[in-house]
Image (cartoon, helix red, strand yellow):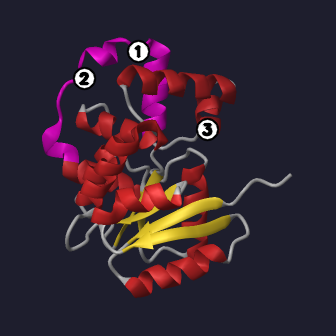
Amino acid sequence: MTNPPIRVAMIDDQALFRSGLSLVIDSQPDLTVVGDAADGADAVDLVRRASPDVVLMDIRMPNVDGVTATRTLCAEFGDDAPKVLVLTTFDLDAAVADAIDAGASGFLLKDAQPEFLLGAIRAVAAGSQVVAASATKALFEKVRAHQTRSPGAEFEQLTGREREILLRAAQGLSNAEIASVEYLSEATVKTHISRVLAKLQLRDRVQLVVYCYEHGLL
């Protein structure tokens, strides 16, 4: 029995871009476009109507921008909110970090190769995050450097091993890579990651990276 296709919605103010993206996505048997909108103001209605698994969100739109729309979706739907993959023209767009803080699962440049875009959609839908690229790390270093503050009481809840796993994950290592360098099984690493996210009250590994930069841990 095959799995149902991943449901994708798009929010972007450029109609031509949405049309081209729809053709690329619908060409894949495991992906399907279920709806689109031209502005972040329509995000909640679009999600209610189309029930997407992943929302491709333009970061900059004339009325309601992608940051506000992402925050609204996460507040409105909570744990049932779709994954949000932010699209931007510039790899050092400071607004991207705000979108990550708001709940987005990563970001992608609009001129990314189609294969990379499709892979990113699948990864985000599966619960992974598009965050390991060097451009992403440079972004966080650029826009968070002046906001460093000491970790709070939540950090003290982490065990020594969990702190090691936290830093490995924030550096962009996959579960398999962490398992190799820490001499653990992938299942054990996954359990540690889940506990770290729960103790720090973070939604995913993207917010984990932001947390580490904000608190001077990297």
Picture quadrant of residue 208: top left
Q: Is residue 143 above or below residue 187?
A: below
The residue closer to the viewer here, 186 or 119, is 119
Q: List the residue tagged with mark 1.
A: 158
Question: Amino acid type of disc 3?
Answer: Glu
**Range drawn in magenta:** 144-170
- The local secondary structure at tag 3 comes to helix
Residue 33 percent location from the top left of the image: 57, 70
Sequence-first tag of 3 and 2? 2
On screen, residue 156 above or below 18: above
Q: Residue furthest bottom?
A: 16
Query: In the image, is residue 69 above or below residue 116?
Result: above
Out of 67 and 76, give the one closest to the viewer: 76
- Measure how far apart labels 1 and 3 are at the Cα level: 21 Å
Write the residue at 51% across / 57% down.
54
Q: Nearer the viewer, residue 9 or 89?
A: 9
Residue 55 image point, x, y percent: 46, 60
In the rendered image, residue 164 lying in the magenta stretch gets the answer yes
For mark 3, what is the residue? 177
For label 2, the residue is 151
Q: Split into 4 quadrants, where in the image is the C terminus?
A: top left
Q: Of the residues shown, which amino acid type is indicated by label 1?
A: Leu
